[in-house]
Image: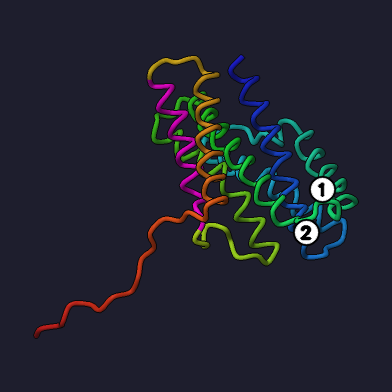
Amino acid sequence: MFETVTMALDWLGVVAFAITGALVASRKEMDLVGFALLGTVTGIGGGTLRDVLLGSPVFWVREPAYLVTCILVSGLVFFTAHIPQSRYRALLWLDAIGLALFAVAGAEKAALAGGNGIVAVAMGVITATFGGIIRDLLGGEVPVILSREIYVSAALAGAAAFTLVMTFDAPRELGIGTGFAIGLLVRAAALHRGWSLPRYRPRPGLPYNR
């Protein structure tokens, strides 16, 4: 049952992120191969790194249907990307959904693999953010983690919420729902209200005395 829930989260996250990768390709006016490449690396990038770090079989190698789905989804976006009035807004909100899904899925998979709470949270953040980083770099976009927006923090909140709920031996479905809701709400609120964390500002150093 637990593995089934984790697989469902993986599937939803892969599809959501694959769409965001293809939407970036549409903004850059790439060809069909470019769509497939960006959609695929975005959809499976975070989960691939997670599985490698956990020493688990890479999920899309075990189930090539993930890879095929990314390609098919990317191809569908190639023919339909013109429909949304604002592809950038669609990209941001789909990315928020994928982020929340993958934050919980990554933490869940790490927990099932025997990782402690810290490892689970770290794997949730990596799973949720790595695909988006690759997407932005390949698409010539400024990586979202370098912007002022709350992004990694939203993934951290979702993964931490899931892990915290599970420390009380709560039903796993409650932990998954709580983690997803918190991760999505934090990211959505940041998008809607323009929230950002305080940033470092240069200031004069201390005088040097010989």
* Image coords of residue 166 (percent x, y): 43, 22
Q: Give the range drawn in magenta.
A: 149-167
In the rendered view, tell whether residue 20 sits above or below residue 185. Answer: below
In depth, the one of 75 and 62 nearer the eye is 75
Taking the image as shown, residue 71 lies to the left or right of residue 155, namely right
Instruction: Please tell me the numbered disc located at residue 74.
Output: 1
Taking the image as shown, residue 190 lies to the left or right of residue 94, namely left
Q: Which residue is drawn at 49% across and 44% down?
A: 154
* Image coords of residue 20 (percent x, y): 71, 50
Residue type pointed to by label 1: Ser
Residue type pointed to by label 2: Ala
Instruction: Please tell me the numbered disc located at residue 207.
Output: none
Q: Distance between the residues labelled 2 and 1?
A: 9 Å
Q: In which quarter of the image is residue 136?
A: bottom right
Q: Residue furthest left?
A: 210
Identify the image quadrant of the C terminus: bottom left
Instruction: Please tell me the numbered disc located at residue 25.
Output: 2
Q: Give the class, few, some or many, for how many residues have Cα within 10 Å of label 2's Cα (few <14, many ≥20).
A: many
Residue 152 colored in magenta in the image? yes
How many marks are shown on the rendered structure? Answer: 2
Q: Which residue lies furthest to the front in this view?
A: 193
Q: Give the class, few, some or many, for how many residues have Cα within 10 Å of label 1's Cα (few <14, many ≥20).
A: many
In the rendered view, tell whether residue 100 sits above or below residue 2. Answer: below
Q: Which residue is drawn at 85% across and 51% down?
A: 83
Identify the image quadrant of the N terminus: top right
First of labels 2, 1 by sequence position? 2
Q: Is the magenta stretch mostly helix, strand or loop?
A: helix
Residues under numbered marks 2 and 1 in contact, where contact means CB atoms less than 8 Å apart: yes
Residue 69 colored in magenta in the image? no
Secondary structure state at the residue bearing disc 1: helix
Taking the image as shown, residue 182 lies to the left or right of residue 200, namely right
